[in-house]
Image: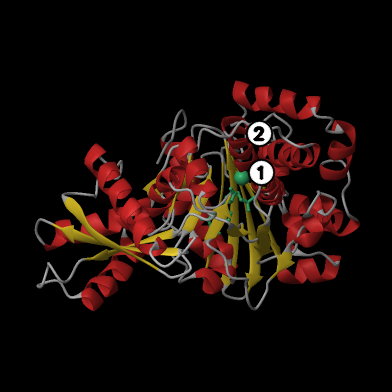
Amino acid sequence: MSTKGRPKRVGELIRHEIASLIAKGLKDPRIGFVSVMGVRMSPDLNYASVYVSLYGNESERKSSLIGLRHSAGWIRREVGKCLHTRITPEIRFFPDDTLDQVYHLEEVFEEIHKDQDTSPMLRLDLPGLIEEIRGFDSFLLTTHVNPDGDAVGSLLGLTHFLRALGKTSIACVMHDPVPQRYADLPGANKVVINPRKVPECQAVIIIDVAGRDRIGDINELVRHHQRVIVIDHHLGEGPSGSIGYIDSSYAASGEIVADMFELAGLEITPAAAHCLYVAQTTDTGGYRFSNTTPRSHRIAVKLLELGVDVAAVSQRVFDTMPRPKFELLRQVLNRIEFSPDGRLAHSYVTIQDLDEAGATKEHLDNLVNYARNIEGVRVAALFFGSGPEITKVSLRSDPDFNAAVFLENYGGGGHAAAAGATIARPLDGLRDEIVNRITKLLTDAPEGISE
Ligand code: 5GP
Ligand code: MN
């Protein structure tokens, strides 16, 4: 069969299909009145350039184009259902400047890039997120600095999910190393730490963190990527220009991944179960923290039925304290001070303490909980002077004191009961300030505080 007229025919089919999708109405509210003027196919049929006429004033037309570009993955999948080609072409929308003379292509694209940088994250529901993910073939996954059990567990759990979806091109990168106690998770040995370059990919997925500033140096490597997908359970809005799913009712990002398996109709593999159980059990403090829900337990039941070795995970994750961590703990406990009413307990460590203990940052994880567990304490704070001008604050609180909101004033975030901030100020002055502010808040409103 001659293939000469094929691009034209495929292009016409695509034009027809997109026009009818638009006529039925697309979900993105930014898409206003648009019509498809023509489609130009690349000779290999891998790309379809879709030329659209945009109506309305300049900002309406711009919004429509942004909306169309955001919906391109979904549109591609819908189109794919009607095309009988081996690969569904990637769809790119362009304003039709032959019909729309006042529109200057270059300017528009510059504007769009600017707009994408500032437009708020497009929130999807979980089925929508899965659909979006299905539309891509290659992925780069990352998570936050100082990764905890949920960061590593959900990141690796997500790689298992993508494999179950049939994806094969998946790379995982992180700013900081995998902490030793999570190093046995299936796939942990494949995570590349602090690379100088990242492989080409169609989509970047950031999990267990909503802010680009929290992925460390990886941010620089993915800054200009067109498609950033966020999956998270922290309080926050998500990076501008991205799309994603953020739901703070989940106790762990790993729980979201477990639900993604379920919604996609896929069996959780034993390897994924191991990762997701570690994600859940660490972020819920062994199903004891206030974020633990009936859903957490339902998910846990499923994971245990898949054979997770609870005793082995607990021993490794909770009950084994490396000697350097123990040495830090000594310091932290020795230095605990209380507010006059005993409602705030706070302590500190410095980089020198870490050096002396032979410890690394990963050994600081959850040291603050010891102060939190003292009777009468409603807020616990641990200050870590990681440099002369940089202080990391960790807060743990009871549900009445919203630690994440409190730390927003310092550029931090997290959850209501567990939050952190990294602040470019020396430890001493900052500690006094935060201790005084929290003490006052707890004294002024002893029964219920949500800043
Ligand atoms: P941790 O105190 O254990 O480091 O962190 C507690 C929570 O606060 C975690 O959910 C973490 O993501 C968040 N968090 C910790 N440090 C920072 C920070 O520097 N900035 C922001 N925005 N959140 C943080
Ligand atoms: Mn988490």
Q: Can residue 290 be seen in the rendering of this structure?
A: no
Looking at mark 1, is its residue's CB closer than 8 Å to ligand 2?
Answer: no
**Residue 391 in the image: above or below residue 158:** below
Q: Quadrant of the C terminus?
A: top left
Residue in the foreground of this view, choosing between 35 and 322: 35
Please state which amino acid type lies under the numbered disc 2.
Answer: Leu
Residue beneath label 2, please?
266
**Residue 328 in the image: above or below residue 298:** below
Residue beneath label 1, please?
161
With 230 as the anchor, is 260 left or right in this view? right
Give the x, y percent position of residue 350: 70, 67
Give the x, y percent position of residue 346: 63, 50
With 395 as the anchor, is 244 left or right in this view? left
Give the x, y percent position of residue 343: 57, 38
Say whether marks 1 and 2 touch (CB < 8 Å): yes
Toward the front, the furthest residue is 1
Please state which amino acid type lies under the numbered disc 1.
Answer: Phe
Going from the N terminus, do you reach mark 1 or mark 2 first? 1
Give the residue drawn at x 48%, y 40%: 402
Q: Looking at the rendering, which quadrant does residue 100 occupy?
A: bottom left
Give the residue drawn at x 87%, y 41%: 319
Residue in the foreground of this view, choosing between 32 and 79: 79
Give the residue drawn at x 62%, y 72%: 198
Asked which secondary structure carries label 1, the reply is helix
Asked which secondary structure carries label 2, the reply is loop
Between the residue at mark 1 and the residue at mark 2, the CA separation in whole angstroms equals 8 Å
Give the residue drawn at x 29%, y 58%: 66
Badge 2, how many Cα within 10 Å: few under 14, some, many 20+? Answer: some
Residue in the foreground of this view, choosing between 88 and 243: 88
